[in-house]
Amino acid sequence: MDRRSESLAFLIFCALGVFFSYFIYGLLQETITKTRYGLRRIEFTYIKPMLFLQCLINALFAQAALRYWREKRSTISQKSYALCGLSYIGAMFSSNASLRFVSYPTQVIGKSIKPIPVMLLSVLWAKQRYPLKKYIFVGLITTGVVMFMYKEGTSVQSKTNFGWGELLLLVSLGLDGLTGGMQEDFRSRGHVGPYTMMRNLNLWSLVYLGLVILLTGEVMPFVAFVRRFPNVASNILLFGIVSAIGQMFIYTTIVHFGPLMCSIITTTRKFFTVLASVVIFGHALSRLQMLGAALVFTGLLADQVYGKSKKRPNALNASAASSCNHSNLSNSSVLLDAKDTVSKKHS
């Protein structure tokens, strides 16, 4: 097997790791956030403490991995990690907050175009350069995902609070691009390993989340809720473990193939989940969905065949994708989205 075949096989391995881990992640997220607890049907609203525990488990997994897989000492300063962690958390919060104001199609479109701002911010921040064909391939993939996931007959605008949701989505997309641009800059100048990056970004995320939780006073109410409903604790623990496994695949992808490739994987993950639902359950595809699927596969295939640079084989796969880590937090469940997208398409 030549080097290119080995690289492609490793990329597929990482992509499958992301797909499967975040599929389970979505199911657990749905279980935690959508279950109504007790006789009074109490809703779980402690998202920030849950994310804090998630980041804590991520950091612990990364530290454990560093004990078994030694990495070269990173030359990236903690100041740079702190700034990157802040943009990552900002993107996560603005993405989650936008869901209160925008409809599902708007959310899908916003999430699906992430590779574009991510790519542009890598050019502006990390001085990355891409050939024209790379922009075309990414555009094909992004357009295809939007067409495949969009529900015909549903307005993409929210009738109430119009403007806030769209603004928050723009902020989230901009911060996604900024985070990815910084990650690309880390790759180009700092000899940073995947687990070192994973540990440091999650540690800084813990700092920011911890401050927010203390200011909002959510610690004791969260503890009381978990004591009252102990099954929540086990679900959150499993949720964090699955998240950590997924992040190990994500940061490995970022370091070895670039944040843009990671962004493409997480963007197309939802597409492939819905497509699998279509194949397994025999749902019919509309013409718009078939065209979208054709664009996605065309873009992915063209990128693999023609998107490699002879001079810089890794550069063409680089851009930005902090969204890799939080894209799954803004949806309730991958499985629910798959069922909802197909069923509403043909209802």
Image: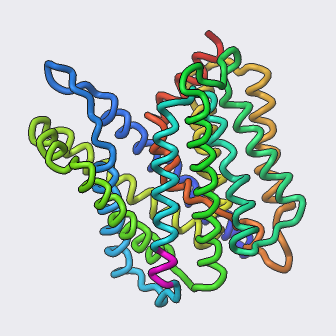
Using the image as rendered, state which of residue 173 and residue 258 is in the foreground.
173
Extreme residue toward the top, this view: 347
Left or right, 39 with reference to 175: left
Left or right, 48 with reference to 262: left
Residue 344 in which image quadrant: top right
Q: Is residue 87 visible?
A: yes
Left or right, 136 with reference to 231: right
Where residue 141 appears, as percent x and y from the top left, is 76, 45
Q: Which residue is found at the position 66% from the left and 53% from the top?
A: 264
Q: Which residues are magenta?
A: 77-81
Q: In the displayed structure, would residue 185 be above or below residue 219? A: below
Display coloring: rainbow
Extreme residue toward the right, this view: 132
Q: In the displayed structure, would residue 241 be above or below residue 63? A: above
Residue 262 in which image quadrant: bottom right
Q: Which residue is found at the position 63% from the left and 54% from the top?
A: 174
**Does residue 271 belong to the magenta stretch?**
no
Q: In the displayed structure, would residue 311 be above or below residue 180? A: below
Left or right, 131 with reference to 267: right
Main SS, magenta region, reads helix
- Total marks placed: 0
Q: Which residue is found at the position 34% from the left and 68% from the top?
A: 59
Where residue 92 appears, as percent x and y from the top left, is 48, 51
Image quadrant occupied by the N terminus: bottom right
Where residue 8 appears, as percent x and y from the top left, is 68, 64
